[in-house]
Amino acid sequence: MKFSTKHTILFLSTCALMQGAYASGYHFGTQSVTAQGTANSSAAEADDASTLFYNPAGLTKLEGNQISAAINLVKPDVKYENASATYTGGGNVPGSTSGKIAKDLKIAPHLYGAYHLNDQVTVGVGMYIPFGSGTDYAEDSVSRYNLNKTELTTFAVEPAVAFKINDQHSVAVGAIAQHADVKLRKYADWGSRLGASGQADGAGNVKLDDWGFGYHLAWMWDVNDRARVGVNYRSKVEHNLKGDAEWSAVGPVAQRFRPAIQATVAQGGSGYVPQEDASLDIVTPESLSVHGMYRATPKLNLFGDVTWTRHSRFNEAHLKFANDKRTLSGALSNETVIYPNWRNTYKVGLGASYQYSEPLQLRGGIAFDQSPVRSADERLVTLPDANRLWFSLGAKYDFNRQHSIDVAYSHIHINNASTRTQGGTTYVDSNVRSHASYKSSANILGLQYNYRF
């Protein structure tokens, strides 16, 4: 079968459903195995077509036309323990108090191409995974009344064009088309309406998706034969996610009272209808990075990168349902609201490459990635984010002038974290107070093939 662009996008979107967030916030950790080998500090290098993501002005620096295809295998380890929860009206929430909330293996592919139209203009296209987050609690977890499962998956298609102004300066612009898919699960304490909290649970599964659009700007400057600096800006992308929510009764008590609970408010019920429309607005944040490269010796290159991300755009989120529901306060509401109150963040990375022999280059790097979470009171149970350190090693092997491969391994150390949530009574909410502790880490193995023609 002929491998078309349509099949490529389908492959990316299918694999994207298996990935998670391993940089701060809900960024996916890396979009290039070449960059991964230096803990993503080598944006100024412009070594292959994957420079399109980190600084597309580097497309003008490439020798010949190129294609780079990469895949990352990610093994996360996210566990919670010592969890507890109490109903707003009193009493402990029963259920499991510890467990693993991330899948064992995740896959993320990326694909890039670059073509020189002439000596001044180079065009490129990239298909990559920019953002993602996924956690899934056991259905009997004491944390089930919070959002019990979240899965944000994205993939982006970006055409870009780079202009060589002169031998020192290049600029680029790209257009980003980004698809986002969100899946959520939350439990509702239907028993509170019956004066029997915890004895009749309802579960809501929400599926939403949307296309959003943004842009990409970059500049690269060869200061001299040994030093290069660059600036890269990626815009925000707004998503108005729409889809549906399906509510179901959990357990025999909930099923017994389901007709009354799942009727609309106008019909005398609580409004948790079996199926209804739902929506959620999110904004994936803009970022600005400044990076540099210095040729210390003919064999040794040094890299550095500082990236600022406007994570503060995620200060609150409103999951809206088509039908009003009765809350614990007695008021009607059609939304669940969270207030993560994220802050803007910085990532600092340092790395190096060493040409060990004519075909073999060794690479390494370390990075500090600041978390946007301010405190345990604002940390989400489905995104227990914390400051992290990246430790990366990599290698590039040139088989000949046309064919080369990159391999990289990264260990991500994530600080221990905790959550403290307060129940709400005026929203479609869990109406519980909860606490939990988290231990997280991840390992990423990357493989990339580069073809020059």
Image: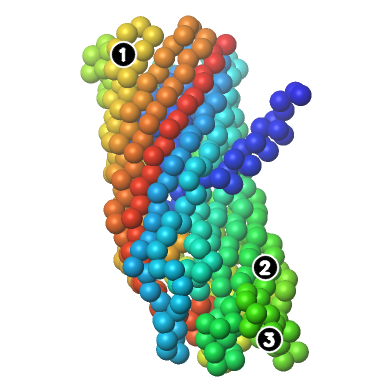
**Placement of 189 over or under 393, stated as above or below:** below
Task: Tell me the number on the disc at residue 245.
Answer: 2
Which residue lies at the image location 39% right of the left edge and 39% below the top edge?
443
Q: Say above or below: 127 vs 341.
A: above
Q: CA distance from mark 3 to mark 2?
A: 20 Å
Amino acid residing under circle 1: Gln
In the drawing, what numbered circle is on residue 446? none
Above or below, 127 against 359 in this view is: below
Image coordinates of residue 90 in percent, x first then y, are 42, 89
Classify 10 Å Cα crowding around label 2: few (below 14), some (14-19), many (20 and above): many
Earlier residue among tags 3 and 2: 2
> Is 5 left, or right, of 168 in this rendering?
right
Q: CA distance from mark 2 to mark 1?
A: 55 Å
Image quadrant containing the C terminus: top right
- Residue at horizontal 48 percent and vertical 15 percent from the top: 404
Residue indicated by mark 3: 257
> How far across and down, in percent of the image, does residue 26 sit?
46, 52
144 relative to 356 in the view: left or right: right
Left or right, 186 with respect to 26, comes to: right
Q: Could you say which quadrant of the image residue 432 lies in?
A: bottom left
Q: Nearer the viewer, residue 20 or 343?
A: 20
The one nearer the camera, 298 or 371, is 371
Earlier residue among tags 1 and 3: 3
Amino acid type at circle 3 is Phe
Q: Residue reaching furthest front?
A: 252
Disc 1 secondary structure class: strand
Res. 154 visible in picture:
no
Which amino acid does the dot numbered 2 rest on?
Ala
Between 185 and 315, the residue placed more toward the observer is 185
- Mark 3 is surrounded, within 10 Å at the Cα level, by few (under 14), some (14 to 19) or many (20 or more) other residues, namely some
**Which mark identifies residue 355?**
1
The foreground one among 130 and 327 is 327
